Image (cartoon, grey):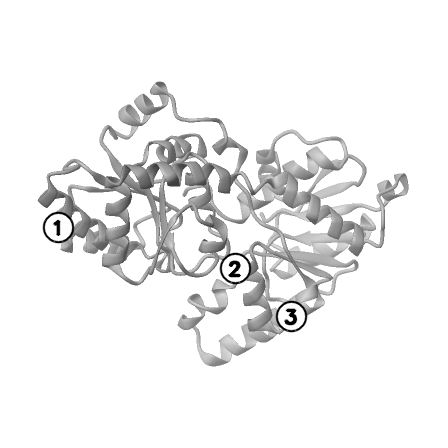
Amino acid sequence: MTEFGVGTYIRNVVRALGRLDHNNQYFLMGSPVKVEEIGPLPANFHTVPLLDPDTEPKGYFEFRKILKRLRCDLVHIPHLFWLPRALPCPYVMTVHDVLEHLYRARDHSSVRRALHLHLTRRVLKNADRIFAVSQFTKNEIEKLFGIAPACIEVVYNAIDERFLRGHATDADRQLIAERYLVNYPFVLYAGRISPHKNLVRIIEAFSALKTELDKENKLRDLKLIIIGDDLSSHPDLRRTVIRSGVQNDVRFLGFVPIEVLRIFYDAAKVFVFPSLYEGFGLPPLEAMAHGTPVVTSNTSSLPEVTGNAAVLVNPENVFEIMRAVHRVLVDKALRDKLKERSYEQSSRFSWDGSVRRILSVYEQVAGNAKLSDDSKTRPGVHSIPA
């Protein structure tokens, strides 16, 4: 699969903590292999193996035992969970979205949904502070769980530093031409493959776009490239491609590492991301860092993240998506304006800036108005999922 999700969040937060804080002690609990992926860290960061998931009894009791042994002041749990935990120290947690209680919850019985909601609310109310990755997500937490606004801090995500290495070179473009046989203009989607990502409508909009461009005798060799996780569990997408008559013009590439994904972002004519729901929506920001025009949704967190640097559409209207992509492709003045705004908007988000806010909350929750040498005996903790 592509490099999306909580793992990316953890890597970037921990790397920024390593740059910014050399006083507090940090214990990274989880799979040592996952910790190694973070890269070199200063001497105040330590790996504590926790091989069993802390959602299972064995892992949970081992987790509590480690916290007690290390006399931890604080634990940061980097994702939403629903099983209440009696931990021996305060905890803060990051909420990326509440998707489990919206789209995915529809598959569960009403009793299970109610229990899931009740237990998650208890977990959130017991947290000393909640980090929401957008104002939209903060509002969702308040509405759905009745959490007081003062308990929730908005701390934005940011772009992985590997996306900030300048534009693709001729050698980079040669790489995707040789390895992926991509030597034609393309519209790009990158992200997870799941129903709320709205890929069926992307394919239908692309089919309508091809018809429109053929009439105008423009960009006849344009393709749609979809980069994401395993396609085998989503046969509806293949059926949509065939039904829409674009089987020769749509390519599913599956896993693409960040070093190559950045080349695709840079080379794309348009990045299209009309998702139905996003807690933050990082892929549009990653595309914008390369100056690539973005067409995205006018719903959830996406207007907040993209500002005035993207074309916003109703994600449920196939023809509105098509018209927006068409306009961006053929209107050079619009492309130039979006490119300029994209650089400016994407530069507003930084991991160092976000982690400074996280550090401030760590200090408040741990009861320290100011970090001191004494804090070296009062460890901070990051939990790394196995």
| Residue 197 at x, y percent in the picture | 37, 56
Could one spot residue 367 in this view of the protein? Answer: yes
Asked where in the image residue 54 lies, by quadrant, the reply is bottom right
Instruction: Sort mark 2 into few (<14), some (14-19) or many (20+) by Cα contacts within 10 Å.
Output: many
Q: Position of residue 171 (x, y in %)?
A: 35, 19
Nearest-to-viewer mark from 1 and 3? 3
Q: Which amino acid, mark 2?
A: Asp
Q: Residue at x 27, y 61 (%)?
A: 317
**What amino acid type should be assigned to the residue bearing mark 1?**
Gly
Residue found at the far front of this picture? 333
Task: Pick the residue in front: 348 or 75.
Answer: 348
* Residue 252 place in picture, x, y as percent: 28, 43
Name the side, left or right, on which 25 lies relative to 177.
right
Q: Position of residue 219 (x, y in %)?
A: 17, 37
Q: Secondary structure at mark 1?
A: loop
Q: Disc 1 to disc 3, how far (Cα)? A: 48 Å
> Would you name the residue on which mark 1 appears?
245
